[in-house]
Image: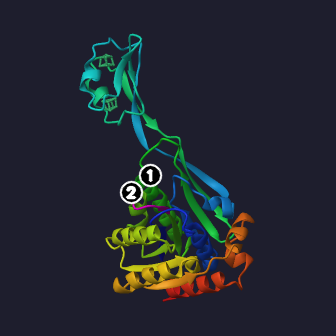
């Protein structure tokens, strides 16, 4: 079973909840889909066994020795990525969209396309199974595609090594990487917090998730910080036929445990947060 844990925004406690679910499964593939700011590896400290390059795109590179300065590439580039600087034709790699047009029309074949390949994907082992995660190099794009590639590797591992569960720690927001996290997952767990923005972000991510997944659950984290807003969230979920599977109280030991490199389940298994997450686990994985 593949479970996607997402939230409409950052800072809801999604990663600590994902990690707690990983420690409850005891035998799973943990996937950090937040390729812009992966952090699950910091907690679980996997032993890295494989590292792959992720080709996030390509850019045009001009061989100045071959260029005859005809200017065709400059006039045809629709992204204004080519300019003349100190008498030389140059490509602005930030503006270049990698469309390859210039390399095809250059009369002297002075332009080649270079892969953008600084981003990395890692596969490793940790105390509960295997971990797959990626780190998108700053400035590189295509995070949605990167998440898809990471999930493909996780699926292959699950099949080859017989892991029954994959837990996806999704990125914040509702953009491409979130859609790539949700597409094809069996169930979605949406983590929200009791605030106006928490409610509105939850609504947005529910609307996105509904396009891909039938089984959607909500966890209200730190519900006791604003009980009135928690009630509004529950009412919305009730009206939307989405079960609220846990209301987790604020407990600073969640962060304390994370700082110590452990989950709340590992450090404080008798806490109310841990008890309620065990119930979430039972509902989601065993129902
Ligand atoms: S099309 Fe080729 S030869 Fe012409 S300016 Fe561009 S790089 Fe130089
Ligand atoms: S690859 Fe496309 S976007 Fe990049 S410089 Fe060439 S024509 Fe412009």
User: Which residue: 71% across, 82% down?
Assistant: 269
x, y percent for residue 223: 55, 79
Residue lying at 60% horizontally and 53% vertically, measured from the top left: 50
> Quick check: 208 above or below 79?
below
Q: How far separated are the C-alphas under marks 2 and 1?
A: 7 Å
Vertical placement of residue 50 versus 198, above or below: above
Which color scheme did the rendering employ for the protein? rainbow
Nearer-the-camera pick, 215 or 255? 255
User: Ligand 2: which quarter?
Assistant: top left
**Relative image position of residue 200 (x, y in whole percent):** 40, 69
How many numbered circles are shown? 2
Marking on residue 143: 1
Instruction: Please name the predominant secondary structure of the magenta segment in the image.
Output: loop
Q: Position of residue 61 (x, y in %)?
A: 41, 26
Task: Determine which residue is flagged by label 2.
Answer: 176
Q: 44 or 17: nearer the eye?
A: 17
Q: Residue at x 37, y 14 (%)?
A: 66
The picture quadrant where one finds residue 252 is: bottom right
Upstream in the sequence, badge 2 or badge 1?
A: 1
Query: What residue span does the magenta drawing correspond to?
Result: 171-175
Measured as percent of width and height from the top left, residue 224 is found at 58, 80
Q: Secondary structure at mark 2?
A: helix
Q: Report whether residue 26 is seen.
A: no
């Amino acid at each position: 079973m593949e479970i996607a844990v997402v939230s409409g925004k950052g800072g809801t406690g999604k990663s600590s909840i994902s990690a707690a679910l990983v420690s409850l499964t005891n035998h799973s593939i943990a996937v950090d889909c937040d390729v812009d700011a992966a952090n699950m590896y910091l907690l679980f400290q996997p032993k890295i066994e494989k590292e792959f390059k992720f080709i996030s795109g390509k850019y045009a590179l001009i061989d100045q020795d071959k260029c005859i300065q005809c200017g065709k590439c400059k006039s045809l580039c629709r992204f204004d990525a080519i300019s003349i600087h100190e008498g030389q034709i140059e490509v602005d790699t930030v503006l270049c969209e990698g469309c390859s047009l210039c390399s095809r029309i250059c009369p002297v074949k002075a332009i080649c396309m270079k892969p953008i390949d600084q981003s990395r994907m890692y596969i490793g082992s940790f105390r509960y199974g295997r971990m797959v995660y990626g780190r998108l190099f700053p400035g590189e794009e295509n995070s949605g595609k990167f998440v898809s590639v990471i999930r493909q590797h996780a699926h292959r591992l699950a099949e080859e090594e017989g892991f029954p569960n994959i837990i996806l720690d999704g990125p914040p927001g509702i953009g491409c990487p979130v859609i790539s996290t949700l597409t094809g997952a069996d169930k979605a767990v949406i983590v929200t917090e009791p605030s106006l923005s928490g409610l509105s972000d939850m609504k947005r991510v529910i609307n996105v998730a509904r396009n891909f997944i039938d089984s959607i659950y909500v966890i209200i984290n730190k519900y006791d910080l604003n009980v009135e807003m928690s009630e509004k969230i529950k009412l919305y979920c009730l009206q939307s036929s989405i079960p609220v599977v846990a209301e987790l109280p604020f407990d600073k030991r969640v962060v304390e445990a994370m700082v110590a490199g452990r989950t709340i389940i590992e450090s404080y298994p008798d806490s109310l947060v841990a008890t309620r997450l065990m119930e979430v686990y039972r509902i989601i994985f065993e129902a």
